[in-house]
């Protein structure tokens, strides 16, 4: 079931630098749980607690799948060995809280809300899952402001 329309807000997502792991694959692989494995590997490599804040960034830039990056905030001058570094520019987004787990329905709601408002999709990146300390998430759907 889709969340109530009043639960989506338009907010800026600040620029951020992340150290983490990149994955690329199909939607079928993602549904099968591959991304959870990427997050587990990141936690193992950095010795993160289960409640550590992780950002997962998705680029839906092809029809058969997408790219996904799981990472933690890092300072501009810190390089973490064995991890990739990415920088996300500030974005305008539709955002909402999510209890955690599969966010497919919540993102479907955000996309429908974007379309209802006459906004355009942005794909560099498309979505950001902000995993919070309590296991909940904040979902960010990027919108094109140009």
Image: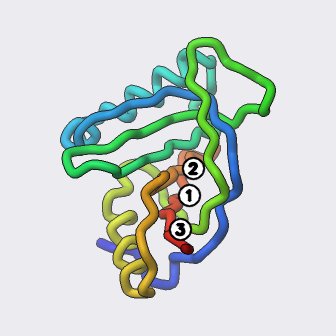
Q: Position of residue 109 (x, y in %)?
A: 37, 72
- Camera-nearest residue between 9 and 51: 9
Q: How many marks?
A: 3
Q: Quadrant of the C terminus?
A: bottom right
Q: Is residue 128 above or below residue 76?
A: below
In three-dimensional space, the C-alpha distance between marks 1 and 3, rounded to whole angstroms, equals 6 Å
Res. 106 image quadrant: bottom left
Circle nearer the N terminus (1, 2):
2
Q: Give the residue displayed 40% in from the left and 75% down from the top.
A: 3
Q: CB of mark 1 within 8 Å of CB of mark 3?
A: yes
Circle 3 residue: 96
Q: CB of mark 2 within 8 Å of CB of mark 3?
A: no
- Camera-nearest residue between 119 and 32: 119
Q: Position of residue 41 (x, y in %)?
A: 47, 20
Q: Is residue 40 above or below residue 73?
A: above
Q: Give the residue displayed 32% in from the left and 64% down from the top.
A: 105
Circle 1 residue: 138
Q: Mark 2: which secondary structure?
A: strand
Res. 81 image quadrant: top right
Q: Mark 1: which secondary structure?
A: strand
Q: Position of residue 139 (x, y in %)?
A: 51, 59
Q: Is residue 113 above or below residue 144?
A: below
User: Local crowd at mark 3 within 10 Å, few (<14), some, or many (≥20)?
Assistant: many
Q: Is residue 130 above or below residue 105?
A: above
Q: Mark 3: which secondary structure?
A: strand
In three-dimensional space, the C-alpha distance between marks 2 and 3, rounded to whole angstroms, equals 10 Å
Circle 2 residue: 130
Q: CB of mark 1 within 8 Å of CB of mark 2?
A: yes
Q: Give the residue displayed 44% in from the left and 87% down from the top.
A: 117
């Amino acid at each position: 079931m889709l969340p109530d329309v009043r639960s989506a807000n338009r907010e800026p997502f600040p620029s951020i630098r992340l150290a983490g792991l990149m994955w690329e694959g199909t939607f079928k692989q993602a549904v099968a749980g591959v991304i959870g494995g990427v997050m587990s590997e990141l936690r193992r490599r950095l010795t993160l607690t289960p409640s550590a804040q992780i950002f997962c960034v998705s680029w839906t830039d092809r029809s058969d799948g997408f790219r996904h990056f799981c990472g933690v905030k890092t300072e501009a001058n810190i390089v973490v060995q064995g991890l990739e570094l990415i920088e996300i520019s500030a974005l305008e987004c539709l955002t909402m809280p999510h209890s955690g787990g599969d966010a497919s329905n919540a993102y479907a709601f955000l996309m429908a809300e974007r379309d209802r408002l006459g906004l355009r999709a942005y794909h560099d990146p498309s979505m950001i899952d902000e995993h919070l300390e309590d296991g909940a998430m904040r979902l960010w759907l990027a919108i094109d402001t140009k």
